[in-house]
Amino acid sequence: MPTYLVTGAAGFIASRVAEMLAQSGATVVGVDNLNNYYDIRLKQHRRERLSRYDNIQFHELDIEDRSAVHEVFKAHQFDAVFNLAARAGVRYSLEYPMIYHSTNAGGNLNLLEEARYAGVRKYILASTSSLYAGQEGPFVESLPVNEPISPYAASKKAAEAMAYAYHHLFEIDVSIVRFFTVYGPAGRPDMSYFRFISWIDNGIPITVFGDGTQARDFTFVDDIARGTIAAAKPVGYEVINLGGGNQPYPLMVLIEKIENLLGKKAEIDYQPFHSADMMTTWADISKAKQLLDWEPTTTLDQGLEKCVQWYRDNLPWSASLSLETGRVPTQDAS
């Protein structure tokens, strides 16, 4: 069976990718630096789930540390690298642009260099729909994405460009997967749905930036994980959208659905729209359907029900989780 490296393995998406790979019988080597960008208990919660699998090894290390990354590659022969580690979040990249660049671009380069010299032929890189800012949706992969509007998006663009260079120069097969508003149980507390569930359930006013008409192409985490694994097939070099692929849902619709699931009404605190945010994300997933035989199978209603159920199943612990994010980061999955 194959052996895979999964970076950011205690993160939201990467932990599900690692688990699905392990369930397929593969050996998974997961790495994560367990930083405190958000409540570390969430990462420990995901890591504990991974610890149930004998075929998952976990190493606490930072992909920015070239020598540590080298030791991992020296100890294993990888069939593919899933680089899902990233500094996540648009707004906080404005506060810590150097850190976002050093992980998302520099850490990515460390992995590409080690893959090059270790003879790893397949590289899967997680990227972002934030690159499509200013374009008309639905977003197709051939759109020019040369004007990122946040340091986070710029750092992901840099990572994509370097991955292409290594494909061109060293014949590494590369799949770039651009994620669209991923949600699901045990997600990131800087995501709106996670906060809304907690705030509404506890009677705390929820913060909405703008008028709530901004819309997102919500995609359930298990669908994203399946698509990311499917992208491990040989493709040469391809950029592939992984998103809901349907008409995007406005934020106010998301709030209404959560209200209905909780049986409680939200008190809304409207704040000015943030200039680094996008009004709408909307994925054209034609390439993913054709190239990967992939499309999402979980509706927003089904996915939100699972999120609320996870929250309830883990009470009172889940209600005690801090929703504060943006501490000076100490690699976190997108």
Image (tube, helix red, strand yellow):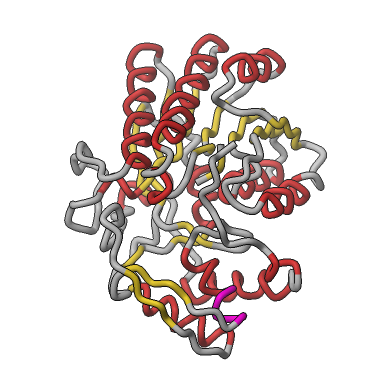
Q: Residue at x 20, y 36 (%)?
A: 146
Q: Quick one: 291 or 182, which is closer to the camera?
A: 182
Q: Quick one: 23 or 280, which is closer to the camera?
A: 280
Describe residue 100's horizontal placement relative to residue 225 as left or right. Answer: left
Describe residue 285's horizontal placement relative to residue 15 as left or right. Answer: left
Describe residue 149's horizontal placement relative to residue 198 as left or right. Answer: left
Q: Please tell me whether residue 294 is drawn above or below residue 127 in the rendered image.
A: below
Q: Residue at x 25, y 45 (%)?
A: 149
Give x and y (percent) for residue 182.
47, 57
Give x and y (percent) for residue 185.
61, 63
Give x and y (percent) for residue 61.
66, 28
Viewer can see residue 247 = no
Q: Please tell me whether residue 130 is drawn above or below residue 200 in the rendered image.
A: above
Q: Residue at x 62, y 50 (%)?
A: 16
Give the quadrant of the N terminus: top right
Q: Within the magenta stretch, is there residue 149?
A: no
Describe residue 266's horizontal placement relative to residue 287 as left or right. Answer: right
Q: Quick one: 206 or 20, which is closer to the camera?
A: 206
Q: Please tell me whether residue 185 is drawn above or below residue 261 in the rendered image.
A: above
Viewer can see residue 187 = yes
Q: Residue at x 54, y 70 (%)?
A: 303
Give x and y (percent) for residue 244.
39, 61
What predominant SS class does the magenta segment belong to? helix
Q: Please tell me whether residue 212 is drawn above or below residue 32 in the rendered image.
A: below
Provide the residue span drawn in magenta. Answer: 198-202
The quadrant in which residue 178 appears is: top left
